[in-house]
Image (tube, rainbow, N blue to C red):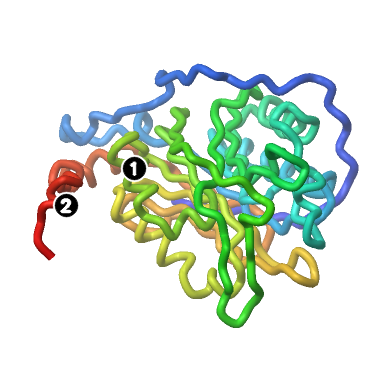
Amino acid sequence: MPFCLSLNCSRFTARNQTHLCPIAHVRSRSFTVKSRATIAGKSDMAASTVRVAAAQMTSVNDLAANFATCSRLAKEAAAAGAKLLCLPESFSFIGAKDGDSVKVAEPLDGPIMQQYCSLARESGIWLSLGGFQEKGCDDEHLRNTHVIVDDSGSIRDTYRKIFLFDVDVPGGRVYKESSFTEAGKDIVTVDSPVGCLGLSVCYDLRFPELYQQLRFQHEAQVLLVPAAFTKITGQAHWEILLRARAIETQCYVIAAAQAGKHNDKRESHGETLIIDPWGTVVGRLPDRLSTGITVADIDLALIDSVRAKMPIAQQRKPIDFWKSSSV
């Protein structure tokens, strides 16, 4: 059964870390667990389930305060037995005014990311750090980067957000993420103790072709969607889109969300969710705006079962079929 833990935000100055955060360039497939319980006709829950946690928080323009919150959430997740904690987009910083995020952007071996690598190692937990402000090719641009850090503090892989949020929100403000962000080009999956992770960030959620690629071409089992959906778009579409991505790919979806008012100009919808391959919400905080974690078990046997009974991977049509079909 899922459960959640809530906590109050606190602020303190984090100690400077002096060691470097290594990047593991070679991915290992040794962590992926392929359950055979369904084929055998029996259930082996101990062997096929792995616990995960998804965070909900309200980041501000204070790196130390945000790190303090993330540290507490990581300790809560580790104490609950989670092997992976997913943090939301912009977990480390949300600026109070335009340009702030570009000013704080750093390379992946900079001191900000080093702190989070140390946090993963000290907590003994994998971290999904979605939406880190990675320094771009010049001083006017950053990359919106999803970073996976293992429990030894090594960066396993990174994904740069492909679809940028250039939107005139109905009844809200106009956003132009492309004015200061470099778009990514690569689709990324990472093997982990909780299965094969498919990486994305926020606005990517509206483009199902990305998730189709992650599932059917790259064998993802768990889709990660760290986000900072606006209050207006979140109320209208957040849960619907997440459940649709879970159902159409037959994957778990873990969506860690920013929540509440970050400053006078920006407010996020919140509602961190964990959804199973059948589209059922299995993890949700009782308050969509509170700071805390929700915890659920990834059942790898359930993934196998859903896919075996409804074999859409085998029933899909190749691209050439659609090119040759008449309109």
Query: Is the residue marked by circle 1 packed among few (<14), some (14-19), or many (20+) residues within 10 Å?
Result: some
- Where does the C terminus fall, quadrant-wise? bottom left
**Most foreground residue, 27 or 299:** 27
Label whose residue precedes the other's in the sequence (2 or 1)? 1
**Most foreground residue, 180 or 256:** 180
Residue drawn at (81%, 61%) of the image: 96
Classify residue 43 as left or right of residue 171.
Answer: left
Residue drawn at (63%, 23%) of the image: 154
Q: Is residue 3 above or below residue 77?
A: below
Residue type at the position of mark 2: Lys
Q: x, y percentage for residue 133?
A: 70, 44
Q: Quadrant of residue 169?
A: bottom right
Query: Is the residue marked by circle 2 packed among few (<14), some (14-19), or many (20+) residues within 10 Å?
Result: few
Residue type at the position of mark 1: Gln
Q: x, y percentage for residue 269?
A: 60, 67
Residue drawn at (73%, 26%) of the image: 109
| Residue 249 visible in the displayed image | yes
Q: x, y percentage for residue 3?
A: 53, 53
Q: CA distance from mark 2 to mark 1?
A: 18 Å
SS at badge 2: helix
Image mark count: 2
Q: Is residue 15 above or below residue 320?
A: above
The residue beneath circle 1 is 213
**Most foreground residue, 301 or 268:** 268
The residue beneath circle 2 is 323
Q: Of circles 2 and 1, which is in front?
A: 2
Badge number at residue 259: none
Q: Quadrant of residue 257?
A: bottom right
Classify residue 118 as left or right of residue 32.
Answer: right
Q: x, y percentage for residue 87?
A: 62, 46
SS at badge 1: helix
Q: Are marks 2 and 1 in contact (CB under 8 Å)?
A: no
